[in-house]
Amino acid sequence: MATAPHVRLTLPNRPENVLVVRQALSGLAARLGLDAIETNDLNTAVTEACNNVAMHAYEGEEGPLEVDVDVLDGALAVLVRDQGVGIETHRRVGGASSEHRTAGGGMGLAVIDALAEHAEFLEPAGGGTEVRMEFPAPDDSVLPPVHADGDGPDAGTAADGSSAIALSVAAGALAQAVLPRVLSALAVRAHFTTDRISDVQLVADVLAANAGDSLGASRLAVGVSIAPRVLDLRFGPFQAGRGASMIAAAADGLAPVIERLTDSARVAPAGSGATETLELRLVDRH
Amino acid sequence: MISVAPTPSTLRAAPTRGDAAPELFASWQRDRDASAREALVRHYMPLARGLARRYGRSSEPFEDLLQVASLGLLKALDRYDAERGHPFASFAVPTILGEMRRYFRDSGWAVHVPRGAQERALKVRDAQERLANAEGRAPTVGQLAEYLEYDVEDVIDALQAIQAYETLSLDAPRPRADGEVVAYGDTVGKNDERYELVELDATLTAVLGHIPARERAILRMRFVDDLTQTEIAERIGISQMQVSRLLRRSLEQLRTLAHAG
């Protein structure tokens, strides 16, 4: 059966989004019990791979930056992927920026090579580039494989398939470690005050802690849209009828947690009615 | 050169700028010519500087890191074997990074909150309060970054640290804006009865009994009275960051208790 990465993050290749990737990794590293130096190695190497995509992959245009993380037996595997211009193409086509991907990227690749236990640079047949890195992880951190659920590639990228920023993460402890970090970093991007960023964290905590039992899949998919002072979040795929219970977050006892912290919360049918998407909007009215 | 092939290939370092003349390496390594070494250091200092900036961001002061990176560069200059035909950078990058890692490891950086990060967390906390008091609402991370002349990400990390590390004595009582020192337990104690969560159902009331009075009061103010975290912070004389931390922790406790029950 096909498996899916434990964490997948898809973002536009803007430099400011690299920060979001780093926040996700820091949450993951803390969960896996990596020490500060291991976390720093991981963050530095992945940052180099992402910066390379941010600066050179699409030649000034915008395109997707995709980061997959898998927690394997004693290893943390990270894949940074783009669908842009590969190094070889850069070299062939020439032009003003042709040196960058090779020369400018060279230092970054040397850093990756020095910090990762194992690193590979690939140009898949379909185009784009992939940097695969492996880092040591504590042996007991191995997570069960996540099945692709047969719900198609879109479930892995966004709850409704339309979002430019998407996170999908194995339900459970990993979601609890990664989701609050990613969403608060995105709240920062939406110019939220520290007060409201904390609310976003609380919402992320509640969802990550309670989603597991209600999901119609083994991964929680989150789609995010950002506007100034507005954060739109879509979570799914919940089993039909379970979205509303997420809003009530009955397990918390405090029924109004999500209702109180969001400006709107509604449930929309998805996947031809078999599942539901929870749509939350948080506004900062400062 | 980076080897690019349809099959997996191991990464190779490509120098960011041209290598220095091989004669310089020979003059230094064979003849101990100090001026050759100086020229080499000058030539490769941007490499060391770049690595110091990339590695260990948000941790130690940059000057300290640069010093360690420079030491790594000197070691690399001593050990590099030009005869092998690899560019110097491909040898120097891992050597310099290794030196920085060893420095962090030896200084206990891996287990302690680094000094730089600790100072920043305290500064962010203080600035957050100052700006909140001045404006009557919490600042954005961008405003904090501008005010403190930090990177946005440094502020995010500091906010994270404030939540994570209680050992920073962030809970110690501090003077309020009016100069009066308030012990937090006291301020909450008076209002305790008013904040009993009578409306909530029986299971929850039982569970809430395990939560300290101050946290119960904060839960009540946020979720029943719909006060913002900043308003709660003002009422009980703690910082909004602390309200955030306490809310997060008590919701987590409630979840655990509810699942256990």
Image (cartoon, helix red, strand yellow):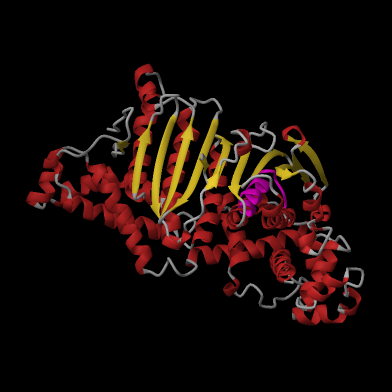
Place residue B40 in its image quadrant.
top left
* Residue B259 percent coordinates (x, y): 71, 67
* Residue A254 percent coordinates (x, y): 81, 63
The secondary structure making up most of the magenta span is helix
Q: Is residue A261 left or right of residue B130?
A: right
Of residues B59 and A162, the one drawn nearer to the viewer in this rendering: A162
Of residues A175 and B141, the one drawn nearer to the viewer in this rendering: A175
* Residue B56 percent coordinates (x, y): 43, 55
Q: Which residues are magenta?
A: A179-193
Q: Is residue B225 left or right of residue A201?
A: right
**Residue under the image location 43 percent in, 42 percent down:** A48
Q: Is residue A190 magenta?
A: yes
Of residues A82 and A111, the one drawn nearer to the viewer in this rendering: A82
Q: Is residue B37 magenta?
A: no
Q: Is residue B181 visible?
A: no
**Residue under the image location 18 percent in, 49 percent down:** B37
* Residue B165 percent coordinates (x, y): 58, 69
Task: Say if A224 sits above or below B4 in the image.
Answer: below
